[in-house]
Image (cartoon, helix red, strand yellow):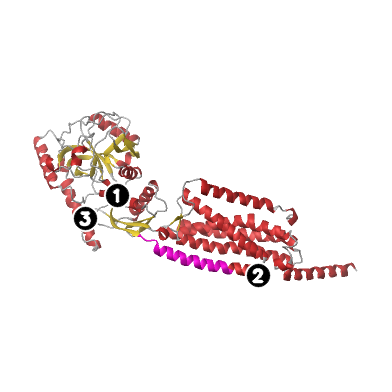
Amino acid sequence: MAPPAGQIRPGRYLAFFVLIVIVLYALVFFTGGGKPTPKLGIDLQGGTRVILTARTPDGAEPSRESLNQARQIIETRVNGIGVSGAEVVLDGSNVVITVPGEEGEQAKNLGRTAKLHFREVIQAVPAAPPQAVPPGGENAGEGAGQESGAPPSGEQQPSGEQQPEQSGGGGAPGAAPQQDQPAPEPGGDDGPAVDQQTADEIKAAKELRQNPALVAENPDDPAAAAAAQQAQQQALAALQCSSQDPLRGNDDPQLPLVACNEDGTEKYVLAPSFLPGEQVEDASSGYDQQRGGWVVNLSFKDQGTKTWADFTSQHVGDRAAFVLDTQVVSAPNIQVAILDGNTQISGQFTQSEAKQLADVLKYGSLPLSFVSSDATTVSATLGLASLEAGLIAGAVGIALVFIYCLFYYRILGVLTVLSLALSGLIVYSVLVLLGRWIGFTLDLAGVAGFIIAIGITADSFVVYFERLKDEMREGRTFRSAVSRGWIRARRTILASDAVLFLAAAVLYALAVGEVQGFAFTLGMSTVLDLIVVFLVTHPLVVLVSKSKKLSSPKLSGLGAVQRIGAGKRSTRRVGAAVKEA
């Protein structure tokens, strides 16, 4: 049996609610260092939308499994570079990346295939006469030794290789970001024709640059060595480093490869891959104080560490190429055996370029190659106009609810307005904190979820007040009806909110994109509704019931039900008197 209303201590509930508000806003204003405003989605603040189109070596339709795997890897890369509020979804054979705010430029580099392989350098030649080498190409050999037209044997020793535990190379002057987005294929409006053209280009490039004859099966056989040398010279002469590489992301690691470095100043004949990038355990960017530049530091898994140690032990004085998407990022000389697996890629990177390279290596290579078919900047004008229209509609609806509650419930209607205002206070603080902690962004769908939740919260108040009026119709006083009405209303409120939260959770689990945001805000508002009803609305009603002035029929609006209850009490008293007589 519930205790009488007089035994309830509403001050404790209200004090606990005030404490929650103080803690939340202390976190909002004194932690995180960000602005005390929620993060907005792309439809409210604008941003960048990048569409990546998958392509396969034979021009066939990519499998759904490969597309899903690519989407997951790109999503992991998005989270890894700290882009908040981004959305990665599949649209047919396209991966659509949506990034709100001013961080969209980073999204344009997320579609790089990032297939890393380690290959032995068989031959390296300049891609242009020495006088035509750009100034950056002459300086690239500093601390690396492979950009100065090294002979095939690669015997030049780099001046900067002073740390035995590192294998570094001066790759091309950080041109990676410019190479990240392949140019659209010619005839981009002719869908299937482009796929066939791409397949033909890949096939032709493989026949020339991945010919097994590039490496002699028996190097001691003069005829086999001469045939391999002839195939190498033919492939090197045909390779144009300045053109778009059709093998990008489509090379076969089990075959030799003829490739260029990233700035196109040197060509290489490379042996089949002896170590795949999947053996990379971790990758990070850092500043090398000795070389005075940004580098990428790699560590390998157990098997990768052993393979790398065996190779460097057997090839001291030779060169190993770090090949990323058919481009040689670095090709250092191996001075000593690297037994612990700690390896360094240097290529005159900028800080952002080194970080981008480290991120794509760290979070895995894509199972497909992609071409950026569209990268557009989205204006927030349309979203803000829609938001303004939605807020006006919501404000009109809330105003009508307030007017109805004040007219029908009077003092209880005032409590409804106050409870909704306090609910909005908590919702705002939670939005700000979720934006900082998990990168939650508020979009139009989320706003719609909150507007619907206002009606749900108001419905909880109506359930409580109607239960209260039912108890008073049964002949109980306002004060005694509060406790019994709350017990009956509480079960109904908990049941309805539980069903709504379950529906929001299922919708969140099954939906994607904006619908998922709608489900999240709806579920969150449902939880906050319970907090407000239990800690604010019910205690305030108890306080009103204990005040003679506030509980008067004129202010409470309960005069009609009180008269009905009084009539029933009189009838019961008359009936009891008749029985006694």
Please provide percent x and percent y for residue 195: 23, 58
Mark found first going from the N terminus, 3 or 2: 3
Q: Magenta part mainly helix, strand or loop?
A: helix
Horizontally, residue 453 falls left or right of residue 159, namely right
Residue 235 is situated, as x and y percent measured from the top left of the image, at: 14, 45
Asked if one can make out residue 460 in the rendered structure from this viewpoint, the answer is: no
Q: Is residue 418 above or below residue 12?
A: below
Q: Amino acid at mark 3?
A: Ala
Q: Is 274 on the left-hand or right-hand side of 432?
A: left
Q: Which residues are magenta?
A: 378-400
Task: Give the number of the mark in front: 1 or 2.
Answer: 2
- The disc placed on residue 408 is 2
Say which label, 3 or 1, has the lower sequence index. Answer: 1
The tag on residue 112 is: 1
* Residue at numbered disc 3: 199
Determine crowd level at label 2: few under 14, some 14-19, many 20+ residues with C-alpha closer than 10 A.
Answer: some
Distance from Cα at disc 1 to Cα at disc 2: 63 Å
Looking at the image, is 410 positioned above or below residue 300? below
Q: Is residue 545 magenta?
A: no
Which mark lies nearer to you, 3 or 2?
2
- Secondary structure found at label 2: helix
Tell me the quadrant of the picture where the C terminus can be found: bottom right
Q: Give coordinates of residue 213: x percent, y percent.
A: 14, 42
Looking at the rendered image, the quarter that the N terminus falls into is bottom right
Q: Is residue 380 magenta?
A: yes
**What's the CA distance linking mark 3 and mark 2?**
73 Å
